[in-house]
Amino acid sequence: MDQELDIPKSMKDTQTLEDLPGVGAATVDKLAAAGFGDLMAVAVATPGEIMDATGMTEAVAKKAIHAAREMLDMGFSSGIDIYEKRKNVLRITSGSKELDKLLNGGFETTGITETYGAYGSGKSQIGHALAVRAQLPPEKGGLGGIVVYIDTESTFRPERIIEIANGLKLDPDEVLRNIKVARAYNSDHQMLLAEKIEDLIKKDGLNVKLVIVDSLTSHFRAEYVGRGTLAGRQQKLNKHMHVLSKLADMYNLCVYVTNQVMAKPDMFFGDPTEAIGGHIVGHNSQTRIYLRKGKKGTRVAKLVDSPYLPDGECGFMITLNGVEDI
Ligand code: ATP
Ligand code: MG
């Protein structure tokens, strides 16, 4: 319960669109329908856009935008404040020293780390390894925390958790008890589950240190077929990822998400694949790792577009014990 003390103001206590002056439930619906689903969207909109979406007068629209900006506290933080905050970043080790080195020590808290790659490239296996290792004490490379696993493809395997736990001489039953698994049946359900994680932390007092969404995009991809609905899909995915990154930031936890790839038809050279979800997923993931199969059953992880680490690659293996160096 100690950790309650440093928990910042609840995400649910923070203000929403309805708290804006001149904005009632009907206007919220109109705003959402036009793509202004949260305060940030309103804060960065022009008065004209808000007027078009809602039929407000210019004065009311300006007032709403101004209020949204105030609520979001869109001011400046000094570099030193951000640096101080970065010092709180914790890391979960994967089991492969090489992979951890690529990530400057492991999978970071305060942000989303995404792996994307073809089937069998090791995305879910890394998830299983992290789900166990996050429970190790800090001196052994974990965070001594509880894990939330949102499983969208029914690929969570307790048997695999037991194997990895045994390899680390942990009590497998205890390790399984500390992983809260929820199967998400569709994208709305998945989004709802992500929103409920805060209750686990606040109401149930669970020391959640790792949230896994495996896979982040499969439901969205399956439900929104065809170009006509792509914008709607992206908007929802964006909202979902915002919830996840806010959790990561507020509760100093690590979010690990997996993502599929699709063939890139216009690419003739190199690796003809790209991650699902386009720039929305790319922008919301602080760290992106492209996974592929290497020689002799190895896996290759490539760090892509890190905000502060050099691009690089390393190899690792998936073994009985989880993830290990070659
Ligand atoms: P998908 O896109 O289908 O979800 P993925 O990237 O999540 O794929 P994983 O499930 O992580 O793929 O990887 C599956 C692979 O992991 C298997 O093909 C196998 O090579 C390897 N693997 C799984 N369990 C073990 C194990 N106990 N020991 C060694 N390798 C294993
Ligand atoms: Mg998988």
Image: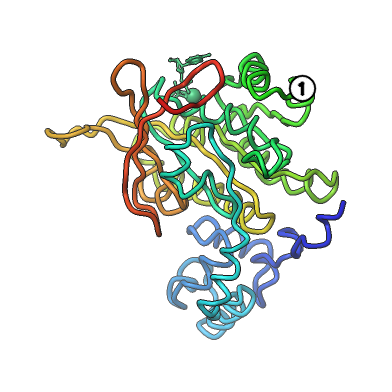
Residue at image coords 47%, 72%: 44
The local secondary structure at tag 1 comes to loop
Is disc 1's CB within 8 Å of ligand 1?
A: no
Q: Is residue 39 left or right of residue 267?
A: right
The relative height of residue 263 versus residue 201 in the rendered view (above or below) is above
- Residue 177 point in image, percent of width and height: 78, 26
Instruction: Give the x, y percent position of residue 231.
Output: 41, 48
Whether 129 is drawn above or below 25: the answer is above
Residue nearest the viewer, comparing 220 with 311: 311
Q: Is residue 105 above or below residue 77?
A: above
Residue 29: image quadrant is: bottom right
Q: Nearer the viewer, residue 144 or 7?
A: 144
Quadrant containing the C terminus in the rendered view: top left
Percent x, y for residue 58?
50, 83
Residue type highlighted by circle 1: Asp
Which residue shows up at 36% across the image and 41% down it? 228
Tell whether 272 sits left or right of 325: left
- Of all residues shown, which one is farthest toward the bottom? 59
Which residue occupies 45% across, 69% down? 52
Q: Is residue 221 left or right of residue 196?
A: left
Residue nearer the viewer, 198 or 222: 198
**According to the image, label 1 marks what residue?**
171
Question: Measured along the vertical axis of the image, is residue 66 above or below residue 294?
Answer: below
Image colouring: rainbow
Judged left or right of residue 216, residue 21 is right
The picture quadrant where one finds residue 72 is bottom right
Residue 160 at x, y percent in the picture: 61, 17
